[in-house]
Image (spheres, rainbow, N blue to C red):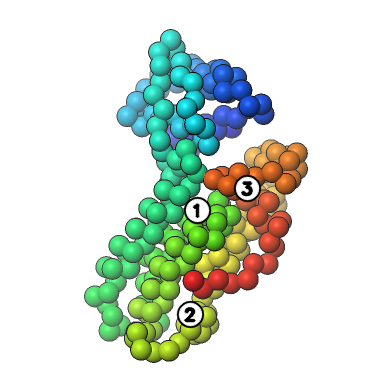
Amino acid sequence: MNVLYADDVSQVVFHPGRSSAMLNARTEREVARISAFEEEWRIKTNLAKFSVIPMATQNPPPLMVDGRVVDFQASGTVLGLQVSSRGYVSHVTSRVRRAKSALFTLYRFRDLDAGLKLHLVKALVLPVLTYPPIPLHALSRTAISKLQRVQNAALRFVVNHRWDDFVTMESLHESVDLPAINVRLHHMASQVWLRMQEEDWEQFLVLQELSDAAPDRSHGWLPRSLRALRDDPDPAPRYS
């Protein structure tokens, strides 16, 4: 499966069996195929950005490409989504760090009108926390809780909430008409799948077939979006 954007090419190579050797052989063929395409069109690969990440695999056998061993990397990025051999934990950590940094830059505007501060938070903080909604919405409660805590801090900034103001987080969210982040991510993910379906994206059909072939299988490190939407179509908001 190829993920293309401009001159960026990311490949997801999978094999239905448990043989690491067969997966490596398939990976070698796919990398060689991309190399042949680049050679035909005189495209030079930036080796500094070239990385191979073994997903959910311990001690994979060496990968050979064009007769040389390619070193595995612990993590990489696909269109802004940080992926590691253990899933998306590093992406959540990065999103939290970036969102906190964006929020910190807004503290100088503490005396602004609440409506303006909310607009700034929606423009500069929330997009960082919710990108990309797939697969973020399907992550564990612990991971989403880390994102929610940053949103809570942003709302306290918006309404000038003091530590001795005994107001629940649910009340704060209702006062500014903002959903909990797990609900927001769920809605955004649903809209992405709906758009893919309505516009007859070929990729949607492929992913739907993969999901239907094993509807109840999932991996703790790499949760499946369609299954998460099916199992919890109307999630209850979580504010902590």
> Is residue 202 positioned above or below 13 on the image?
below
Q: Which residue is drawn at 55% across and 71% down?
A: 238
Q: Where is residue 60 in the image (x, y as percent from the top left)?
A: 49, 25
Mark 1: amino acid: Pro
Mark 2: amino acid: Met
Q: How far apart are marks 3 and 1 (CA)?
A: 14 Å
How many other residues sit within 10 Å of disc 2, few (<14), some (14-19) or many (≥20)?
some
Identify residue for label 1: 132
Identify residue for label 2: 169
Sequence order check: which comes first, mark 2 or mark 3? 2
Q: Which quadrant of the view contains residue 71?
A: top left
Contact (Cβ within 8 Å) of mark 2 with mark 3: no
Q: Residue at x 28, y 68 (%)?
A: 104
Q: Where is residue 125 in the image (x, y as percent from the top left)?
A: 39, 65
Which type of secondary structure does the marked residue at label 3 adopt?
A: loop
Most extreme residue toward the top is 67
> Is residue 71 positioned above or below 182 on the image?
above
Sequence order check: which comes first, mark 2 or mark 1? 1
Which type of secondary structure does the marked residue at label 1 adopt?
A: loop
Q: Residue at x 43, y 73 (%)?
A: 152
Q: Nearer the viewer, residue 103 or 141?
A: 141
Q: Distance between the residues labelled 2 and 1?
A: 24 Å
Mark 3: amino acid: Arg
Most extreme residue toward the front is 59
Identify residue for label 3: 224
Q: Is residue 58 visible?
A: yes
Q: Which quadrant of the view contains residue 218?
A: top right
Q: Which of 136 and 124 is in front in this view?
A: 136
Q: Which residue is drawn at 44% across and 29% down?
A: 52
Q: Where is residue 41 in the image (x, y as percent from the top left)?
A: 45, 20
Which label number is shown at residue 234?
A: none
